[in-house]
Structure formats: C-alpha cells, structure tokens
Amino acid sequence: MDSVLAPGRDTRQLPSPEARWSPGDRMSAKVEAALPGGRFHVRVDDLMLEMQLPEGFQPGDRLELEFVSGQPRPSFLLQTPPEAPQREQVQLSVSSKNLGEILKSVAPERAANAPTTSAPVKEPIPLLEKPTADPARLAQALSGALGRSGLFYESHQAQWVVGQRPLNDLLREPQGRLSPVVQGADKGTPQGKTDVAGVTARNDVRSDDIPLATTTVSNGDDSKATTAPVHPQTLPQVRSQLDALDTHQLVWQGQLWPGQNLEWRIGEPMDNAAGSNDPQPWFTQLRLRLPKLGQLTADLALVGSTLRVRLTAADAAAQQAMADGRPPLAESLAAAGIDLVSFKVAGDGD
C-alpha cells in the first residue's frame, strides 16, 4: 500500500520516512478523513499521509501498518483487515444521535462503507446578469453565493444574535426563508419595511422566530405533530454541511452569468504538524468551459501571500494562450501583494 504526503503538509523540518522507520517496523495509525475515490488522510505519528485503503474503513478507525520503504514514496503493508478495524468506542450524546438520524434522512442511499464525496451546493439562478472580466465583481458574486448558500447558517445566526449581522442576511438563506417572518411576509400579514429581496424587515423579531435545525412537522392535526431532526426543505443544505465537515471540502455549482457554468471546489487547510506554526495552504479548483479556451481546470494553492497555479486544458492553443498570460497575471497579483511562486500549464492526462 503506497502513500503520499497529504497536500499542504510542509515536511522541511520533519525527518524523512527513511529516517523515522526501518523496513519491518510496525506502527499504529488513525484514519482522519475520507477523500473521493477511496483515498483517506491517515495520521502516522505526526505525519499526515494520503493512502488508498480497501472498502470498509471510516474516519476514526485505527490501523496497524508495517513500513516497507520510503522510496519512491512511503509504502506500508496493512495489518488490519478492513472487516475488523479498531474503532474507538465512544458514548454518543443526544446531539450525536440526532446527527445520526439526520444522516439517515439526508443520505439514505449511501452505504456505510462507501467513499465519501462532497454534496455540491447548487445555485438556481446566475450570479450576474451579464459577463464581466472585473475580478472584484466576480469575487463579490462568488463570496455572496457561498454566504447565502445555507452552509454557514448557524454561525451567521450566532452573529445575528450578538448584533454582528443584519436580519435580512439570515432571511435570504434557505433556512431563513422558512422563518415565520418570511412566511408571514409572503401572505402580507407582518407590518414593516420591505427590502430589495422582498423580505419584510421587522424590529420585533425574536431568535425564536428564526428556525434552527430542529423543527416541528404537523400532519394537519396539531395532536399528531412530531419533532423532526431538520426541516424537510433544508435537507440539501444539511447534507452539504455534513459532507463539508467530513471531507473538509466545499463544492459549489451554478452559473456565473447566463450560459456560463462553473464548478468551484474549496479545500480546507490541513492541521499543522506537531510543533509547527507554518501557515497551511487553502486549495481551490475551478472547472469551466470558456468560449475561446474550451474546457479547462484551474487548481490554486494559497499559502499566506504566496500562490501556486496549475492550469489544465485539452486544446494546445488554449494551453499556449494561458502560458502567455503568466507575466500580466504575475504583475496583477504582485500589485495585490501576492507572490506567484509557481505557474504550470498542462494538457488533460498530464
């Protein structure tokens, strides 16, 4: 079983695998996170490694490994059978049990041992009315799309409670639109001032008026009302939240403007190695088809004020055009205080 160092792990101050272990050494490891394609982040000592594991393993499982070699990459023999991983025994709290029920309701089709993939957040309407090459407008539109997606609704709710976020921000998110404030506004019952989103702003709104994850669902007879873990209409947002926590990735799909589709993936920085204070990179990937360049993928890694860029396109002319664009890109980034330390252009399959 081969492994590679997890992306973003700075190992300059850490001993190499050959210096740490000798062939035949056995060690215990822990599965930290599941990645797409049956790969996992596995912590071995203070190193985070990315490994391909057989089906049946889950985050939190303990592994017994035997070190084989450090060249050309760290290799191990798996001593723990996938059907009997050493799982940490924990006592589930009420909240954890509720999360289990939520998982069953948002993803009943997912097998317990299937590889975890991120559930995308889908924007139903284009972010902008027409095309633009203004990076500030694009950044504002994408930031707003994530902010109102519902992925961060609970933290936004906490900010609203302490006066750090306006009420209308909450009411624009999917969960907030289920609020009695909005439902009543749709029926024309509340009195107040209507904002540009068509939501009636009121000064007498209490925190109880803004829905939490748990909701009461009635079948038409108040005597038969039951409490569900989440409101049925928020299940897509809850699934995306749970998958983001599990995979450390956010995936957004939608249109920048009419006809211009985009898939945007964001990877959370890895935890620092023990004793290391070095900043860890944010990873992001954009996949889209442009009129002149065709299908392309942009992978970026931002560490502090340094940026690494890898562009992939199938068309040779598109590759050359992107390579020619490096100097002005570097100048623009430098003007913004960002150092372009790596820029690569590749074809599909490279």
Image: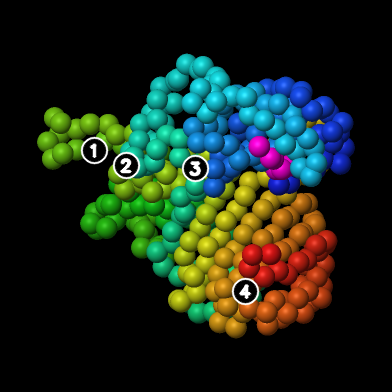
Q: Amino acid at mark 1?
A: Val
Regarding mark 1 in the picture, which secondary structure is present there? Answer: strand
- Which residue does the numbered mark 3 point to in the structure image? 116
- Which residue does the numbered mark 2 point to in the structure image? 231
- Residue 105, placed above or below residue 97: below
Q: How far is the residue under mark 3 from the one under mark 4?
A: 28 Å
- Residue 273, placed above or below residue 282: above
Closest to the camera, between mark 4 and mark 1, is: 4
Asked if residue 282 lies left or right of residue 252, the reply is right
Q: How far is the residue under mark 4 from the one under mark 2?
A: 44 Å
Q: Amino acid at mark 2?
A: His
Regarding mark 4 in the picture, which secondary structure is present there? Answer: loop
Closest to the camera, between mark 3 and mark 2, is: 3
- Which residue does the numbered mark 4 point to in the structure image? 314
Q: How far is the residue under mark 3 from the one under mark 2?
A: 24 Å
The region drawn magenta spans 1-6
Asked if residue 148 lies left or right of residue 216, the reply is right
Asked if residue 182 lies left or right of residue 90, the reply is left
**Where in the figure is residue 27, as x and y percent of width and height?**
71, 22
**Where in the figure is residue 107, as x and y percent of width and height?**
37, 42
Label 4 or label 2, whichever comes before in sequence order: 2
Residue name at image x 71 percent, y 29 percent: 44
188 or 236: nearer the viewer: 236
Label 3 or label 4, whichever comes before in sequence order: 3
181 or 134: nearer the viewer: 134
Label 1 or label 2, whichever comes before in sequence order: 1
Residue name at image x 67 percent, y 30 percent: 77
